[in-house]
Amino acid sequence: MAKYTYPQSQDLQNFVNARYRTAWVWQLVFLSALLIAILSLSALLLNVADGAFGYVVYEFKKDPATVSETPLAELTQPQLLALLQENLSKGAYTKLDKESPMEKRSRDELYNLLIERVIQIKIEKTYNLFDSLLHADVIRAEVAEKYPDATLEFRSWLTPAFLTTPMSSKAEFAGVRTALLGSLWLVAIAVALALPVGVGAAIYLQEYARKSFINNIIQTNINNLAGVPSIVYGMLGLAIFVRAMEAFTSGAIFGVTDSNGRTVLSAGLTMGILVLPLVIINAQEAIKAVPDSIRQAAFGVGATRWQTVWHHVLPSAMPGILTGSILAMSRAVGETAPLIIVGASTFISIDPASPFSKFTALPIQVYQWTARAQAEFHNIAAAAILVLLALLLTLNATAIFLRNRLQKRF
Amino acid sequence: MVRKTFENEIQHLKDEILVLGSMVEQATLEAVEALKKRDIRTSNRIIADDRKINQKRFTLENQVMILIATQQPMARDLRVIASILEVISELERMGDYAKGIAVINVRMGDNALLKPLIDIPRMAEKGVDMLHRALTAFVTEDLETARALPGEDDEVDMLYEQVYRELMTYVMADARTIERANWLLWAAHNLERLADRVTNICERTVFVVTGEYKETRTSFDELETPEEAEE
Amino acid sequence: MQPETPQYAIETRDLSIFYGAFEAVKGVNLNIEKGKITAIIGPSGCGKSTLLRAFNRMNDFVPTSRVKGEILLHGVNLYGKEIDPVEVRRRLGMVFQKPNPFPKSIYENIAWGARINGFRGNMDELVEESLRGAALWDEVKDKLKQSAYALSGGQQQRLCIARTIAIQPEIILMDEPASALDPISTLRIEELMQELKKNYTILIVTHNMQQAARVSDYTAMMMLYEDTRSGTVIEFDKTDVIFTRPTDKRTEDYVTGRFG
């Protein structure tokens, strides 16, 4: 019995305490790792929020009181129309009328037009959120001293109007509608390409392909493609969709004449190709996770492989496939580099109306705005980032919702 | 995987069978010796001791049933177990034969033996010897001995035949001896039955080893007198 | 008394099963009597399941598997060139080790197999009959639309049996059907097998010797060849013979628990 011994009494107590100490140290290490992650994420969010809200100092080029006796906000549509006719040059009015008949524009549109073209707000300076909150009196003193005629206002750059207005060259009138729609178009086209092709490929690889040298190479390549830098996909898209397939992607063969290959379709297909490996890998994992016993059960009652896959494997794998695919889509929403190569326009105020439209996308918009010199563009860039984050969150939430819902069925 | 526990249990049962056998052997030899010497006290003790044999038989039977229930023996194990049940029941019946001889001695009371006993002790010796070897063969699963032994039963049968004829001559000479002759014939018959049951044990041994049921009885056995009605 | 000539439901002729170059099962000759339960027993890894799965060609799914010899159903080789494995699997139903109902309703579990096999007739009737056949009807008749996963393990296994008899096979192959079940559920499955053998021939692989002894009429004992590690049937006889007086020493050792 004495051959093997274990610590006894006081020794045992010390030994156990030492073990608890080690465990505690490791627990602390993991906790700090988590804290670092949370801190960096918070810093990111705060940085964005810092830009998206804050004081803004602006002046009117033309005092509203000299334009109209009644306050502008109370004017009706015909009154606004009259004021615009009165204050705009003939040429400018005709040009606007050509874009869209002035009589048919809504009151809000006309109001914005009046502010933008006639009153002409001029932003003197913007302040970030933290400055605005912490040094409000300093700011007030500075403004009173430097811009005696200006108005100081606390403003959220992210407003409902920001979502619904198109691009503008003046930050205070600019919105992300075009970019948001562009992003949605991109995702829709990418999904339409990547989901069926990706799931199909995954089914083939997982259920049909036998182990062979060629299939191993294909599998390895798919895994590697998922890690290829996105800019490479951009060049691929440029070469294939924009140039080689221009007749198709510009819509020329469908009778569209006024565009080249740099369309939302080219970009969407590029994005589709970009996320395809991800979709395939995710779908493969989901299919792999379907227990073999279900396949055997189906074969056991005399089902063909197709019946087995279609009736049992796919429904069981669907939650996983959808989750994976939607996560892949959120990657597509965030990509910038390939879009720049494929030729996303940076200044577009017309909504993309068909796959053959020119387009811009949210990350492009953010990129372009942050590159501007004027500070107020940096503010709307922050607001656009918030929109982008919200869009990503929505997509991920949909993924989780779909997964839970489909899983609960049985 | 060897079933150590189970094998130990079986070995234990076999040892116990040898103990039970020795009790039967001793009872048989003593009963005949008591009859020969008209020792009624010993006979009474043998009658009383038969309960110990019966008791042991039930104890062993119970152990066998526990083994069946807990170990679920199969094939050879199953045959061994089933045969042990059979053998202990045979031994118990043999114990009854010894007791039967003791009862005869007690019933004879003051009557003298019709004749001095010569062949009956011989029968007892032969039968007990066969029983001893048969049990040893059973315990060691000695197929050869088990197959050979039943042939020796003829010797006992012949002795019985001899006792029978001899007693008949007494009865024919003097009809009044019929009761005393009958007592001795009865004792001889018990010994003849004992030897028959030894062949049953041998059959069991053959069954354990080969899995075959084989009748080894000699044709003479079929002539046996009606089954005794004692007890 | 006329000795009846036994009718064979299925026969194997020198059946060998290979995985790549490895011969997993070697030279098996079995005549499986109709309307009887035949058990295949033997130590782990001796190829019992492999042999069973050869009958309904489930081994086809193992890419490197290959079969030599014949399995004859009514004299027709199931591995013949013109034979469609899908059709084989309908005629030889299979019940697996772990209950594996489809992730669908109880009703659909039975109806699906029938439907894909082109069943024409009253589906409700078929579902009820199959569930009755598997002694499950009374327990589930009020919840046919509920998920099969809500059933207990034993009920799931009986559902799998119902699903199998719904496609009216000639032979039911059972691969350790009770090994994942509790003792009471196991006994119910065993009782059910006695009912089923009135209409079907049953082939069962089991690790549990007592189970083989309890349920089967015939028993095939499998064992590995020491040198090649291939499994083969070393003794095939009536179950009572195998469990009371087997002729092969290895069978003896196995059924008495002295294998090793």
Image: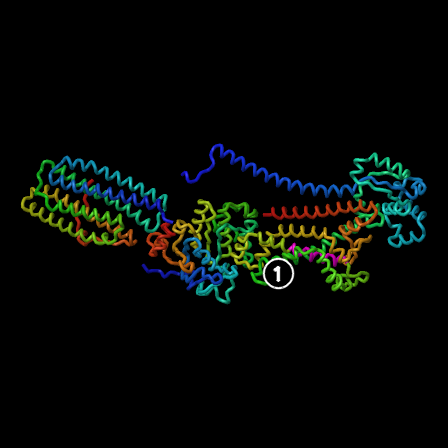
**Quick check: C85 left or right of A159?**
left
* Residue range highlighted in magenta: A263-279
Q: How many marks?
A: 1
Q: Position of residue C199 (x, y in %)?
A: 44, 55
**Quick check: A75 left or right of A217?**
right
- Most distant residue in the bottom direction: C81
Q: Relative to A324, does residue A11 appear above or below in the rendering?
A: above
Q: Position of residue A170 (x, y in %)?
A: 85, 48
Q: Relative to A397, does residue C81 appear above or below in the rendering?
A: below
Label 1 resides on the chain identified as A
Q: Does the segment drawn in magenta span residue A230?
A: no
Amino acid on which the number 1 mark rests in the picture:
Ile
Q: Does the segment drawn in magenta span residue A268?
A: yes
Q: Residue at x 69, y 41 (%)?
A: A39
Q: Relative to A66, does residue C109 appear above or below in the rendering?
A: below
Secondary element at image label 1 = helix
Secondary structure mainly formed by the magenta segment: helix
Label 1 sits on residue: A218
Do we see residue A257 in this rendering?
yes
Q: Residues within 10 Å of mark 1 (few under 14, many from 20)?
A: few
Q: Residue at x 73, y 42 (%)?
A: A45
The front one of B118 and B89 is: B118
Q: Position of residue B160 (x, y in %)?
A: 13, 48
- Most distant residue in the left direction: B173
The front one of A201 and B184 is: A201
What's the coloring here? Answer: rainbow
